[in-house]
Every structure is written in structure tokens, then in C-alpha cells.
Image (cartoon, grey):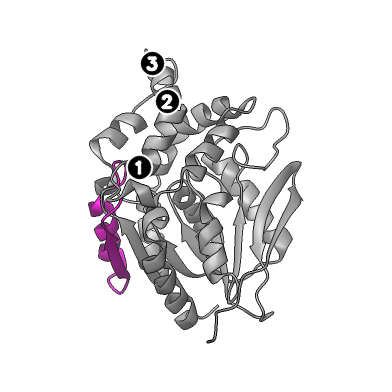
Amino acid sequence: MTFPPVARIAYRHLDVDGVRVFYRESLPERPDAPVLLLLHGFPSASHQFRRLIDALGGRYRLIAPDYPGFGHTEAPAGFTYSFDRLADVTEGFVERLGLTRFVMYVFDFGAPVGFRLATRHPEWIAGLVVQNGNAYEEGLSAGAREFVALRPGQAGAEETIRGLLTLEGTRGQYETGTADPELVSPDGWTLDQHFLDLPGRKEAQVALAFDYRSNVERYAEWQAWLREHTPPTLIVWGARDPFFPEPGARAYLRDLPGAELHLFDTGHFALEEHLPEIAPLIARFLDRTDT
């Protein structure tokens, strides 16, 4: 019996303008293996991709950084938490690694970070894997619209945000919309909560929540980029996501009619419940994408 190669994974840090960026990187057998940059979401970090890296890292070079304010990355005191700054650090991270051409996996917060990278450096993007990473108004649920409308100083706004940063709120992001919660490991939300409870982390998340409106304001710009550059795109979407529902997945087809779309009967963290179906789709996509 022949087994697929088991991934060897390195856990590293890299300094980007005073930010000590932690990242996971698979070490495939082929030195010229296709590169997949994995951009995580809220309230998680690169660990959300651990099983995907195990599954595909023996054949492909998978790289997953933690943003400032997330996971093991350490930002200096006074760091400004905004999506522009997360993109700045991620851009510097890519440049420091010497990456010049890669497929980009965008999930949740990874979409606004990744699309900022794409509009700054279209030559970097060989293709997109979009997993519940929204770029369309119709991809915002009613609850998400209410969240985006929160403003600093508004009565109850900060309390609403902080309610998501509790263990109950974090666990709910993993389990809401799933068909079988027993397939969702508790390790994800407990590790996320560990990081959220570190000094200063909740304040960072509040700042990013108030800045989320800057992403919605750029949707038209990102859609124009998609139409102009038409990157090969694989869309894998948890259709019962309470934040970014199914219409957000289908909306991409307006600007990318050649995109490949797969919907799954699960919630926001689709990899937790459907990795066995999604990993082969990503492998086939990487094999036919020119990196």
C-alpha cells in the first residue's frame, strides 16, 4: 500500500517592522512545490489550518501566518489595529519570505487582508481559494450588518463586541450552522479563547471590529479587481454561516463566471466539519493552477 507523504511542518518567527510574526510552513518533498498562503479568520489564528496543512503539506508548500493581535504573533506596544495595518504586516511578511507567486486562501478576516494584498500586488496572485471570505453586500447577514454598523462611543456597541470574545461566543462561531457538532474539535475554540484572554488582545479585537466598515467600503474596488484580473478561483463555502451566508458565495460568480463553487452543509469554519471533501478540491485546484 502506498501512502501520501506525511507533512513535515516548521514553526517559525519572522520580524516585520517590529512585529514578531509567527507562522507555520510545510516542508514538501519538492522544492518547487506550489505555494498556498493561508490567511486565517476571526477569532482564530494559523492553527485553524493545522489539519489542512497535515493533509496537503507533503505535496505543497503551505504557509500560514498569525496576524498582529492573534495567535503567537507579538506586536509592539502602541501598534494600531486596523485592517490596513494587518495587510501592511502581511505584505511585509510575504516580501521577507521572498514569495513572488502563490495561490491565496482567504477566510473571514483573511478576505479583507488578502484583497488588500491582491490590489497592491496583482502579480503575486496565481489563484484564489475563497472559504467564507466575503466581498459582497449580499454576503452580509442581518446580524453581520448590525455588527458592521456599530460605532465607537455608541451606547452598548463595545459591550456587544466584547460579548463575542467570551468562551461562549467563540464556541458559537465554530458550532453554529454545523450539521454534526461532534465533528468539530473543541481544541479550536479553547485555543482561540486562550489567545483572546491574553493582555491587550480583546482591545485589539474591539478596534478591528470598529474598523470592519472599511472593508465593506472597499467591496466595489475588490470586485473590480476580480473582473479585471479574473484569477482562477475555487470557492468552498459553509452555506449555513450565520455571518456570511450562501448568497455571498454565489455573488463571486458575477465577477468570476468561471469560478468553481462548492457549497457545504455547515457553518463558518467549514474545514472543521468538511476537511475530507475540501482538501482534495484544493489539491486538484493547485495542480492545475500556474504558480
| Structural distance between the alpha carbons of marks 3 and 2 | 12 Å
Q: Nearer the viewer, residue 141 or 166?
A: 166
Q: Residue 117 in the image: state x and y as whole percent.
A: 54, 56
Magenta range: 241-267
Residue under pointer 2: 161
Residue under pointer 1: 175
The amino acid sitting under disc 3 is Gln
Residue that appears at 48% across and 46% down? 41
Q: Is residue 257 magenta?
A: yes
Residue under pointer 3: 154
Q: Nearer the viewer, mark 3 or mark 2?
A: 2
Q: Nearer the viewer, residue 161 or 30?
A: 30
The amino acid sitting under disc 1 is Glu
Residue that appears at 50% across and 55% down? 114
Q: Nearer the viewer, residue 202 or 155?
A: 202
3 or 2: tag closer to the N-terminus: 3
Q: Is residue 230 visible?
A: no
Q: Residue 163 in the image: state x and y as whole percent.
A: 41, 23
- Number of labelled discs? 3
The amino acid sitting under disc 2 is Ile
| Structural distance between the alpha carbons of marks 3 and 1 | 29 Å
**Badge 3 local density, few (<14 within 10 Å), some, or many (20+)?**
few
Q: Nearer the viewer, mark 2 or mark 1?
A: 1
Residue 191: assigned label: none
